[in-house]
């Protein structure tokens, strides 16, 4: 799809879904607006690299579908108090393989007869269907978010039939979310399959993704993001790298190299377990063992972690940014370089003001979220 094209979506056209707020705007204009916003932060004195974009449709690897309708006649998509339920199983943001899988899952749940949760009466069981695909392998992870565990035996009994019907379904779990509030998931997770991890290809590596971990929704652009950070790190050739908010290890693995010490820090215990499983697999591969020999991961709070004597620090914080405390710690640390990956320009701008001991050297925009106003920005900073 070229820069002047617009993606057609019937749900947007009839007004039933407006999640992609920029859909009427041609792709080229969408990206020009994003680039102008980012350029206003950095000015002309910081080198701007060519922006990176990917497919404009079929790019999402994660679907978060609210259950609506009635038992036996479910919709999977949008469901709210103020509007009718909207089925989005054919949403063009998902690849054909995921759209097909969503339709099959809807059929399974209709056959099962599980009632969707009704927001007004607070009755029913199925709240959300969360589906993740390991692109391009098409292996699937399915999570069903329920109000109670009353339907767990029926779901468990149906699982063998589901997997025989759709062999790419590798990981299945049930999440308990009993509270009558707008929360996507609860704390209790019941894994129904013997396989725990979804292996997600990422460059030379296969990252092990757990049911409660974070994964970028655009694998093509995310792969370019990690690869670019890896190239910058190789160019600078630091002897030690610290990756804060490392998640399942996307940046840390791409930072790894023979003779380089790399440590990833992440608060999510499951994400660290997945990263360590990915590391075990990498170190058993003769082509990757030497590069990952000094790579390690630890479960800790990035905001209070000891920064040690790392030459270079990678930060990929949540939308709220780093905050003053971590910016102060980074400013007072020994690191010479900082690579900042941000999904929210205002918080990045605030943090850059608090990281004034570092000078931005170059930046690059990654259009991770077409048809929205959101994007990812990668910045390389050097201590003044």
Image: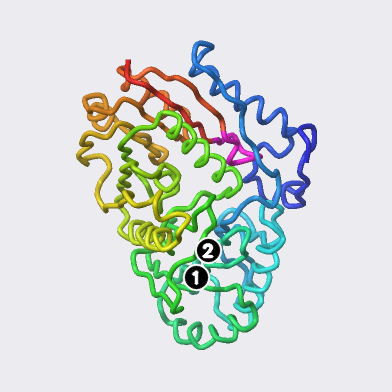
Residue under the image location 30 percent in, 31 percent down: 311
Tag 1 residue: 144
Tag 2 residue: 130
Give the mark, 1 or 2, whose residue is nearer the N terminus. 2
Residues at discs 1 and 2 in contact (Cβ within 8 Å): yes
> Within the image, what quadrant is residue 281 found in?
bottom left
Q: Is residue 253 above or below residue 159?
A: above
Q: Position of residue 32 (x, y in %)?
A: 66, 25
> Within the image, what quadrant is residue 113 found in?
bottom right
101 on left or right of 2: left
Q: Position of residue 279 (x, y in %)?
A: 38, 58
Q: Residues within 10 Å of mark 1 (few under 14, many from 20)?
A: many
Residue under the image location 66 percent in, 41 percent down: 54
Q: How many marks?
A: 2
332 on left or right of 296: left
Q: Is residue 264 above or below residue 38?
A: below
Q: Which residues are magenta?
A: 366-375
Q: CA distance from mark 1 to mark 2?
A: 6 Å
Foreground of the two, 308 or 41: 308
> Within the image, what quadrant is residue 315 found in?
top left
Residue under the image location 49 percent in, 65 percent down: 198
334 on left or right of 272: left
Is-magenta flag for residue 275?
no
Point out which mark residue 340 bears. Answer: none
Foreground of the two, 294 or 208: 294
Foreground of the two, 9 or 265: 265
Is-magenta flag for residue 369?
yes
261 on left or right of 41: left
Q: Is residue 271 above or below residue 230?
A: below
Secondary structure found at label 2:
strand
């Amino acid at each position: 799809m070229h820069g002047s094209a617009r993606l057609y979506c019937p749900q947007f056209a009839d007004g039933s879904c407006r999640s992609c707020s920029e859909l009427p705007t041609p792709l080229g204009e969408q990206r020009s607006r994003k680039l102008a916003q980012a350029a206003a932060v950095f000015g002309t004195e910081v080198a701007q690299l060519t922006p990176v974009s990917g497919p404009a449709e079929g790019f999402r690897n994660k679907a978060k579908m609210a259950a609506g309708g009635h038992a036996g006649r479910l919709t999977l998509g949008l469901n709210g108090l103020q509007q009718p339920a909207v089925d989005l199983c054919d949403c063009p943001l998902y690849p054909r393989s995921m759209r097909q899988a969503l339709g099959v899952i809807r059929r399974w749940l209709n056959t099962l007869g599980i009632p969707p949760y009704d927001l007004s009466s607070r009755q029913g069981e199925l709240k959300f269907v969360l589906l993740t695909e390991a692109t391009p392998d098409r292996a699937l992870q399915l999570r069903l978010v329920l109000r109670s565990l009353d339907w767990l035996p029926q779901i468990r009994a149906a699982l063998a039939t589901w997997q025989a019907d759709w062999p790419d379904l590798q990981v299945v779990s049930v999440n308990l979310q009993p509270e009558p509030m707008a929360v996507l998931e609860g704390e209790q997770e019941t894994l129904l399959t013997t396989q725990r991890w979804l292996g997600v290809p990422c460059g030379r590596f296969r990252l092990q993704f757990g049911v409660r971990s974070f994964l970028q929704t655009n694998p093509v652009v995310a792969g370019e993001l990690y690869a670019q950070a890896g190239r910058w790190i190789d160019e600078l050739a630091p002897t030690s790298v610290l990756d804060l908010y490392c998640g399942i290890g996307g940046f840390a693995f791409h930072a790894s190299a023979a003779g380089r010490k790399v440590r990833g820090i992440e608060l999510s215990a499951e994400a660290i377990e997945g990263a360590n499983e990915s590391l075990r697999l990498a170190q058993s591969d003769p082509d990757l063992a030497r590069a990952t020999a000094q790579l390690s991961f630890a479960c800790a709070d990035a905001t209070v972690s000891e920064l040690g004597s790392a030459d270079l620090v990678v930060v990929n914080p949540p939308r709220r940014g780093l905050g003053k405390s971590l910016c102060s710690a980074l400013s007072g640390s020994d690191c010479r370089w900082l690579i900042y990956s941000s999904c929210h320009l205002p918080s990045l701008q605030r943090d850059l003001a608090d990281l004034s001991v570092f000078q931005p050297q170059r930046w690059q925009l990654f259009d991770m979220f077409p048809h929205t106003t959101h994007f990812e920005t990668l910045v390389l900073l050097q201590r003044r």
